[in-house]
Amino acid sequence: MAQVLEFKLPDLGEGLTEAEIVRWLVEVGDVVAVDQPVVEVETAKAMVEVPCPYGGVVTARFGEEGTELPVGAPLITVAVGERPTGSGGSAASGGSSASGGPAESASEQPAGAGSGSGAGGSGNVLVGYGTSEAPARRRRVRQGRPVPGASAAGSREVNGQGAVQTAVNGQAGAPETEDGPVPVISPLVRRLARQNGLDLRELTGSGPDGLILRADVEYALRAAARSGAAPTAKPHPPVPQAPGTAPAPQPTATAAHGEIRTPLKGVRGAVADKLARSRREIPDATCWVDADATELMRARTAMNAAGGPKISLLALLARICTAALARFPELNSTVDAEAREVVRFGHVHLGFAAQTDRGLVVPVVRDAHARDAESLTAEFARLTEAGRTGTLTPAELTGGTFTLNNYGVFGVDGSTPIINHPEAAMLGVGRIVPKPWVHEGELAVRQVVQLSLTFDHRVCDGGTAGGFLRYVADCVEQPAVLLRTL
């Protein structure tokens, strides 16, 4: 007798309370192993794959892609347990469907599968599946629910039964419309078509029984692009949601004024909350100075000409920051407001602002004070690439004690950085550009950069902040100053 267990969205750590479903990795009817990833979610900090602690057959999924779920909300239900070969009954017996009703019957085995006694089978089956080498994916069959516009003759064969295909997540795999069901079961295909305004009812699928595949949608979009015509865009019925979940927020337009409203969620929402909290809680102040970076650029050129891995400019600036924090440790701290204490750190976990397709993220280089320029370069490169691909872990995005923000890459000279709460300071670096500069008593064209320091006035006064910034500027102008700390 199978036991149906509910797997809820676990606490992903680092104070996260919710996550958005990005991509389902399993479908209803799939066999999952213990600790197999079943869904990819996006938190306010990173994209993570969530493993299921149960092994068995997925009987229901909760939430469409794009839905935001709180920690503790149900993700999937899994039928766990073995039953004798050839026994009847539904694999999902006793379970609940995503639509909140009784568990719906599923075909006993994948099409073409035996009772478990065939070649490669073990004899016993795990909730309707034999232990063959490569069990095929199963498709659910919804029974006792007529589809408008679909006759018995027009229904598609699924696993040898004449019934309309049903989807993952216990929803209609083919959206029911007045024109009949659309032969598509993949939520990714539906989303791709919806985002590009393509009417799936106009397509002929190349899959089994006319199933519309992703390749069919992409081919239609390419054909429309070549012809210069917009893809057919008929309104689609809303996708049903699992009980207890709200529809995924989408940008909405106000017809009267053409306003567009985009929900603050995911990374954008987390950034908004953190910046607002920083402004509310931290009495910050900013000081800045222009510095001649000509010698720093020459030093970097000489390092890279000497052979070995290339040294990045960001790594040199990071090395300068850690040296400055060793002299002015007040800025490598945080304020415990409840205890009314300043907590000074004995290590430097250096965050650096990075702009990605997902928004602004701040990866953290652990123990930056113990790394040389070559090690810093490699770690910056690794974390930057992980940020671009969305594979940064929550641990790599938290725990920073000081942040370096190189906004010069955007072609701007200066800024007043907002402190990355709960840290106490952030150093901003503008672009390095040729400017007229008085050098050794004469006017010359030099490589000039503006440096900005925003600091929490609770941890130190202006003298400390000014001393820190002046030391950074001195190291930028004369990199040999760093030799005193090596």
Image (cartoon, grey):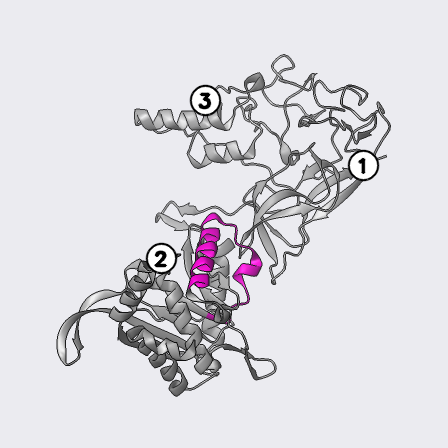
* Left or right side of 185 for 77: right
Q: Is residue 28 above or below residue 63?
A: above
Query: Is residue 426 visible to the viewer in this orientation of the structure?
Result: no
Q: Identify the residue position indicated by label 1 in the image.
A: 94
Q: Secondary structure at mark 3?
A: helix
Whole-percent x and y of residue 250? 48, 46
Please state which of residues 354 and 194 is positioned toward the viewer in this rendering. 354
Residue at 61% of width from left, 63% of height from top?
15
> Is the Cβ of the residue at disc 1 closer than 8 Å to that at disc 3?
no
User: What separation in Å lies between label 2 and label 3 (alpha carbons)?
Assistant: 60 Å
The crowding category of the residue bearing disc 2, from other C-alpha atoms within 10 Å (few below 14, some 14 to 19, many at least 20), is few
Among the two numbered marks 1 and 3 on one chain, the one whose residue lies closer to the N terminus: 1
Query: Is residue 146 visible to the viewer in this orientation of the structure?
Result: yes
The number of discs equals 3
Image quadrant containing the C terminus = bottom left
Circle nearer the viewer, 1 or 2:
2
Among the two numbered marks 1 and 2 on one chain, the one whose residue lies closer to the N terminus: 1
Q: Identify the residue position indicated by label 2 in the image.
A: 307
User: What separation in Å lies between label 1 and label 3 (alpha carbons)?
Assistant: 39 Å
Q: Is residue 116 above or below residue 378?
A: above
The crowding category of the residue bearing disc 3, from other C-alpha atoms within 10 Å (few below 14, some 14 to 19, many at least 20), is few
Whole-percent x and y of residue 159? 69, 20
Among the two numbered marks 2 and 3 on one chain, the one whose residue lies closer to the N terminus: 3
Residue 376 part of the magenta-drawn span: yes
Q: Mark 2 belongs to which amino acid?
A: Gly
Q: Which residues are magenta?
A: 374-402
Q: Mark 1 belongs to which amino acid?
A: Gly
Q: Secondary structure at mark 1?
A: loop
Q: Identify the residue position indicated by label 3 in the image.
A: 202
